[in-house]
Each structure stands twice: as C-alpha cells, then as structure tokens.
Amino acid sequence: MNLIDGKKIAAEMRNKLKVEVDIIKKKFNKVPGLTVILIGDLAPSQIYVRNKEKSAKEIGLKSEIIKYPKDIQEISVLNKIDELNNDATVSGILVQLPLPDHIDKKKIIERINPDKDVDGFHPYNVGNLSSGYESSVPCTPLGCYLLIKKIEPNLSGKKAIVIGRSNLNGKPMAQLLLKENCTVTITHSKTKDLKNECSKGDIVIAAVGIPELVKADWIKKDAIVIDVGINKTDKGIVGDVAFEEVSKVAKALTPVPGGVGPMTIVCLLKNTIECFKKSLK
Ligand code: NAD
C-alpha cells in the first residue's frame, strides 16, 4: 500500500509557492495578502486561523486577522467585507466558519468579491465549478484532488464514490472528479447500502465525520482511498476510514492526521496567490 504523505506533498507545494511569491514581489513590487475574519472565541476556529496566518507568513504572504466578539452586528461585518473588497492590498478574504447564529452565513459569503473568495464558497464560484469553468475551489476538496492526481494522473473513466454531500467537501469534490471524466456517485446519510456503493469505487473519498466508518470489506482491491474526516476519539484523532484494515486492501490511502489536513492549508495559500493573479488582469 502506498501511504499518501500529505504532509510531505504539502511541504513541496509550499516551497514552490514561496518561490512564486518571491518572483511576484520582484516583478510587481507587491505582496499577495490574505485577510481572515474571525468572529467569536471558538477554540478550534482560533487554532485554524492561527495556523492559516502562520503558513501564509511562512511563504511570504501578507497576512492579517480581524477579530470580532461573538455579539458583533452583522452589518459591521458586511461593512468590513466591503472595505476589504475595495482594498487593493487584500488579495483574498476568508470568513472563518461557523458563524454565530445571528449572522447570516449566506449573506456574508455572497458579500465577498468572488475574485477574492479564497474559500470558493461564493455562489458565483460554486456555479463556475459546476459548469466546468475556471473558479476558486474549496481548499479541502482541492487538496484531495491534487493527492489523487499524484497517484493517478489519468482519472478518465474511473468510478469515484464520494461519501458526504456538504458544500464544503462532498459536492465540490464530486465536481472536480466529474471534470476529470470520472463516473461519480455522491453518497450521504440517506444512501441505502453504502457498503455496496463504496465497494464499486476505484476512488473513494470519505468526508463524513464518523470515526472509522469505512471498513476494509467496503473497499475494492487497489482502490485509492482519501480520508477527509477528523474525529476526536478516546484513542486520539482518527479519520472516517478504518486505517489499519483498509491499508491492507487499498492501493493508496491517506493517514489522519498527516493526509488531507496539511493539503487544505497549502491550497488556501495557492488560492490566495491565484486571487492575486486575477487582480492583475
Ligand atoms: P458535514 O457534517 O457538513 O457533512 C457530513 C456529510 O456526511 C453529510 O453530507 C451527510 O449526509 C454525510 N453523512 C452523515 N452520516 C452519514 C452516514 N452514516 N453515511 C454516509 N454519509 C453520512 O461535514 P463536513 O464539513 O463535510 O466534514 C466532514 C468531515 O471532514 C468532518 O470530520 C470534518 O471535521 C472533516 N474536515 C476535514 C478537513 C481537513 O482539512 N482534513 C476540512 C474540513 C472538514
């Protein structure tokens, strides 16, 4: 079995992006910038945002975090987004989710200029992705896609099973694979006989949030298995795939941690640089 080392692949990508940022600085005398808006004090969100800032700075991007208390009014956030949309030094804007209940997520996402939407959540980008046009792509599925392409550059005709249909993971993942001419099945909590669906997959992507849901007898021999899940359990962080047993059947498998997670962050950096390039056009 080929262990897909997301940490190593992400590090290689980071090095290349750092070189690209250096070239941009020399050529345009500008620094691509990522601004993250963090509302409230949820511990996981604070950790994610800190990691994003650290990674951005490591490759030479300008990085800023704007923090608001959890009772901030929606209009204040919308006004700040307007300001950032008009700020030429800001290439990418990310509003860390989840948001407090009184703030309308859809309204916030739709206010971000699609050309600065590093998360790829704006309906304009979602629409472009599903139409097969160029678009900003959500970071986690983009990371999964790059890992799959490393293992199998030609995906045409492969059968891909995506478990989970979230806007964050499952749906954009399916669109990316469809664009590569895979035959894609999206499964979810109401799917009948998930095991049988999974067992048909040349590629299986699990983005569910249930510890070790996917077992060895769900997986076709020599399938590529990508585990997006991050689940806290008594034995530590585990994915949605029963790693030990599935590793005996799969051709390639991502570990948790160290698989998809590091790719998510590096894809955010990649998206920020892509947004900067769009601003030059
Ligand atoms: P979500 O809760 O929005 O969606 C989960 C999906 O799983 C839903 O579409 C649901 O229909 C499906 N589902 C639920 N129970 C199921 C079942 N029994 N059988 C089949 N499908 C079922 O979650 P999400 O935001 O897409 O995240 C999924 C997992 O990925 C979580 O563990 C999350 O922590 C993790 N995650 C990891 C990264 C990363 O960088 N590695 C990034 C984002 C999310």
Image (cartoon, rainbow, N blue to C red):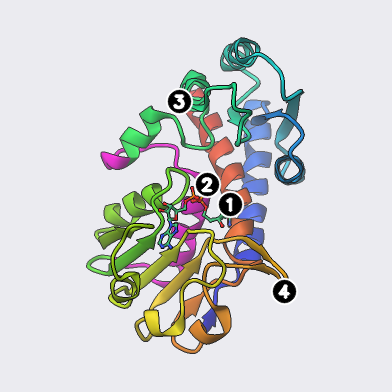
Q: How far apart are the alpha carbons under marks 2 and 1?
A: 5 Å
Mark before the other along the chain sequence, 3 or 2: 3
Residue drawn at point x = 35 percent, y = 75 percent: 195
Say whether residue 154 is left or right of residue 233: left
Mark before the other along the chain sequence, 4 or 3: 3
Q: Which residues are magenta?
A: 130-155
Q: How far apart are the alpha carbons under marks 4 and 3?
A: 41 Å
Q: Secondary structure at mark 2?
A: helix
- Residue tagged 2: 139
Mark before the other along the chain sequence, 2 or 1: 2
With respect to residue 75, does 212 lie above or below?
Answer: below
Q: What's under tag 1, amino acid-wise? A: Thr
Q: How far apart are the alpha carbons under marks 4 and 1?
A: 24 Å
- Residue tagged 3: 114
Say whether residue 142 is magenta: yes
Comparing 129 with 243, the one in front is: 243
- Residue tagged 1: 264
With respect to residue 43, does 7 lie above or below?
Answer: below
Task: Give the foreground label among 2 and 4.
Answer: 4
Q: What's under tag 2, amino acid-wise? A: Cys
Mark before the other along the chain sequence, 2 or 4: 2
Q: How far apart are the alpha carbons under marks 3 and 2?
A: 15 Å
